[in-house]
Image: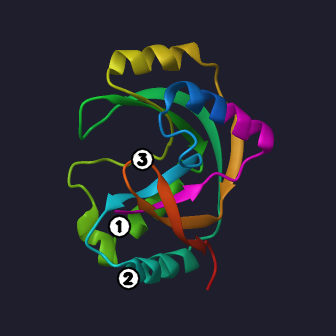
Amino acid sequence: MLVIYAKLEISARDRVEIEDIRQRFDRLQGRVEPHFTLVFPFAGVSVGEVLGHVQHIASGVEPIPFKLAKIAAVRDPLRPGAHLFCLPDEGAQQITDLHDRLYSGVLATRLHPTAVYLPHVTVGRFERYEDAKTAAASLPAVDIPGRLSVMTIGDFDGEGVEDLHNVRLGAP
């Protein structure tokens, strides 16, 4: 399945902070870098079609500054379980707008009809929401500034991602 995401451009110190949390709570830590998922895993569209679409969208979007500021437990809306999300308080609307623009054209039918997008960096996965809440309460607040300037189209096998194409925001 394909996925579209943006890796975090953050300081080395902040990357260590995120990775320390992920090491404790996220089974995918080490298999994919910290990122914002922009288009969730999908099938049925060729890589070439997706690449052309992503390039078109990227050409009209400037790099997005953000600041991660909160860690929250969030129920998974599509299956049992919960996640630990690191949420931005700056840049959230621009990331949401990019997500919305990507779910047009060849990807318009790939948007889940009931899912509501919340820009986030997943730092934990849990079978029970109560465990995610406990983990969130145990962590200090974060203050991680960064930037998104590249979208990546990846091949997701359920456990890890192989990067296929990188597309720079604002590039013609």
- Between the C-alphas of marks 1 and 3, the distance is 23 Å
Q: Residue at x 58, y 40 (%)?
A: 89
The magenta stretch spans which residues? 1-18
Q: Residue at x 63, y 70 (%)?
A: 62
Q: Mark 1: which secondary structure?
A: loop
73 or 98: nearer the eye?
73
List the residue tagged with mark 2. Answer: 49
Horizontal relation, residue 109 to residue 65: left or right: left
Mark sitting earlier along the chain (2/3): 2
Evaluate whether residue 60 shows in this view.
no
List the residue tagged with mark 3. Answer: 159
Q: Amino acid at mark 2?
A: Glu
List the residue tagged with mark 1. Answer: 103
Horizontal relation, residue 51 to residue 59: left or right: left
Q: Residue at x 64, y 35 (%)?
A: 19
Q: Amino acid at mark 3?
A: Glu
Task: Where is residue 31? Give x, y as percent.
Answer: 53, 46
Mark sitting earlier along the chain (1/3): 1
Residue farthest left in this picture: 113
Could you tell me which quadrant the C terminus lies in?
Answer: bottom right
Q: Mark 3: which secondary structure?
A: loop
- Between the C-alphas of marks 2 and 3, the distance is 24 Å
Q: Amino acid at mark 1?
A: Tyr
Residue 108 located within the stretch drawn in magenta: no
Q: Nearer the viewer, mark 2 or mark 3?
A: 3
**In the displayed structure, would residue 19 be above or below residue 60?**
above
**In the displayed structure, would residue 168 be above or below residue 159?**
below
